[in-house]
Image (tube, rainbow, N blue to C red):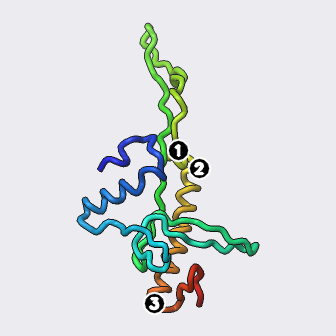
Amino acid sequence: MSAGNSPAAAERANYALFLSELCDFMEVPRPEPTLAEDHRNHYVFEKAVIFHHLDGITSIGRIDLYKRAHFILEAKQGSNAPEANTSTNPDGEFTLTPPAPRPARRRLGTAVRGTINWDEEMLKAYNRTHIAEILATLTALGQVRLEGEKYSL
């Protein structure tokens, strides 16, 4: 699989290619093209969802990969922390030097792995996934129904 080889790869630009290649590797069907009639989008990238916030405002979001009554997937691209340069001086002592200047600006992804920001982003993605899984399960059980863009009990 080629899409994730670059640590500076952009999440939005590469996750669909990576997941498509993963489907090929696992010998399962790739997601289907998105249709204008959203209720027919059973297995697609970028599934549109409407979020109803507590203050009454609604906003449109996207689920990175959605398969009705099976799963949703939130893609996240992280980056590694920059490595410090190390060397030994003529006396054989170990020294730590500042990292080399960064080349031109590059995309770092959602957050640096192993940091509090990374943990927070993973928790946000988990929470979105968990809510969508609950809705998918309730829909499959007939306890909730999708009416246009809204779920109803």
Find residue 87 and report its horizontal and vertical position in percent: 44, 18
55 or 58, which lies in front?
58
Q: Where is mark 3, residue-wise?
A: 141
Spatial CA span between label 1 and label 2:
7 Å
Asked if residue 128 lies left or right of residue 69, the reply is right
Query: Which numbered disc flags the more N-terminal residue, 3 or 1?
Result: 1
Query: Which numbered disc flags the more N-terminal residue, 3 or 2?
Result: 2
Looking at numbered disc 3 in the image, what kind of residue is underneath it? Leu
122 or 52, which lies in front?
52
Q: Is residue 88 above or below residue 152?
A: above
Residue pictured at 55% horizontal, 67% vertical: 127
Spatial CA span between label 3 and label 1:
39 Å
What is the crowding at mark 1: few (fewer than 14 residues within 10 Å), some, or many (at least 20)? some
Looking at numbered disc 1 in the image, what kind of residue is underneath it? Val
Looking at numbered disc 2 in the image, what kind of residue is underneath it? Asn
User: Farthest residue toward the front?
Assistant: 36
Q: Secondary structure at mark 2?
A: helix
Query: Which numbered disc flags the more N-terminal residue, 1 or 2?
Result: 1
Residue 112: which numbered mark, if any? 1
Spatial CA span between label 3 and label 2:
36 Å
Say which of marks 3 and 1 sits in front.
3
Residue pictured at 58% horizontal, 83% vertical: 151
Q: Secondary structure at mark 1?
A: loop
Find residue 81 and report its horizontal and vertical position in percent: 50, 38
Dot 1 and dot 2 residues touching (CB under 8 Å): yes
Q: Where is mark 2, residue-wise?
A: 117
Residue 13: which numbered mark, if any? none
Find residue 54 and report its horizontal and vertical position in percent: 72, 74
